[in-house]
């Protein structure tokens, strides 16, 4: 069953802790993305990667880090430097063939709450 | 630079009546346009996409959208709302280059009443 999995579904963090959100895809997509969703603000891009071992900052990268060691995996670390990390985090993937007409496929999301 | 504006943050309809969710876009080049739906605490699911092949695009669950270049609009419609349509809907624009980045609207919450 092809798709994108994110874990955990819910995550609680104490202030000052780093946490890592998992994202795995078996769609054989080259590109992967991390978004943050806050109420009334739509989705904002944190980081993206178009190929293994390469990634770029999105619009709100401060306080986050990523790695792309395998095509299937794109974990996101929320560091203690992120001042307001409570949000819903969505991972997506996309094939890079055929230009810009390709949709992104989304995982089910991880809800992070800072206690 | 690309942008998208969803003109209504909340829309309420009665079951069985038509749905109209409005979206205007701005793009320097020929854009790709998408509508996604999100149910509470879930990921986003693609409803339909515009790829320049046809201006009237049909999607899943009876939704369709019409690309109007002169009006820079891509409104989402459905002839008859169902209770299961209650969700948040996002209009999205993409331009080739720059990593195939998507720009999302702020969303429209659709409420369907009996």
Image: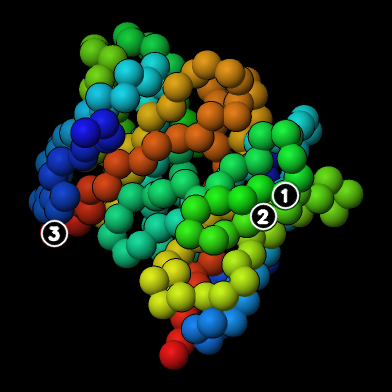
Residue pointed to by mark 2: B65
Marks 2,1: beta carbons within 8 A: yes
Residue pointed to by mark 1: B56
Question: Secondary structure under badge 2?
Answer: strand
The residue sitting at the bottom extreme is B114
- The quadrant the C terminus of chain A occupies is bottom left
| Quarter residue A25 falls in | top left
> 10 Å neighbourhood of mark 1: few (<14), some, or many (≥20)?
some
The span from disc 2 to disc 3 (Cα, nearest Å) is 42 Å
Q: Is residue A88 above or below residue A70?
A: below
In the visual, does B111 lie left or right of B33?
left
* Color theme of the render: rainbow
Q: Nearer the viewer, residue B85 or B74?
A: B85
In the visual, does A48 lie left or right of A82?
right
- The reply to whether residue A41 is in sight is no
Q: Residue at x 25, y 20 (%)?
A: A72
Q: Residue at x 64, y 65 (%)?
A: B77
Question: Secondary structure under badge 1?
Answer: strand
């Amino acid at each position: 069953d092809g798709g994108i999995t994110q874990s955990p579904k819910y995550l609680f963090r104490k202030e000052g802790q780093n946490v890592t959100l998992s994202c795995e895809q078996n769609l054989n997509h080259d590109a992967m993305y991390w978004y943050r969703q806050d109420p009334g603000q739509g989705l904002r891009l944190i980081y993206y990667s178009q190929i293994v071992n390469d990634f770029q900052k999105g619009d709100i990268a401060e306080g986050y880090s990523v790695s792309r060691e395998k095509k299937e995996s794109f974990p996101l670390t929320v560091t203690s430097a992120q001042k307001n990390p409570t949000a819903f985090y969505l991972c997506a993937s996309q094939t890079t063939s055929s230009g810009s007409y390709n949709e992104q496929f989304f995982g089910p999301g991880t809800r992070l709450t800072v206690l | 630079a690309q942008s998208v504006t969803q003109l209504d943050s909340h829309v309420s309809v009665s079951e069985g009546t038509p749905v109209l969710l409005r979206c205007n876009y701005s793009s320097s080049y020929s854009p790709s346009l998408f509508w996604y739906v999100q149910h509470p605490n879930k990921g986003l699911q693609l409803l339909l996409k515009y790829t320049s092949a046809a201006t009237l695009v049909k999607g899943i669950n009876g939704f369709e959208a019409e690309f109007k270049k002169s009006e820079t609009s891509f409104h989402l419609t459905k002839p008859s709302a169902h209770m299961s349509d209650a969700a948040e809907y996002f209009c999205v624009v993409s331009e080739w280059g720059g990593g195939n980045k998507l720009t999302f609207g702020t969303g429209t919450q659709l409420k369907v009443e009996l």
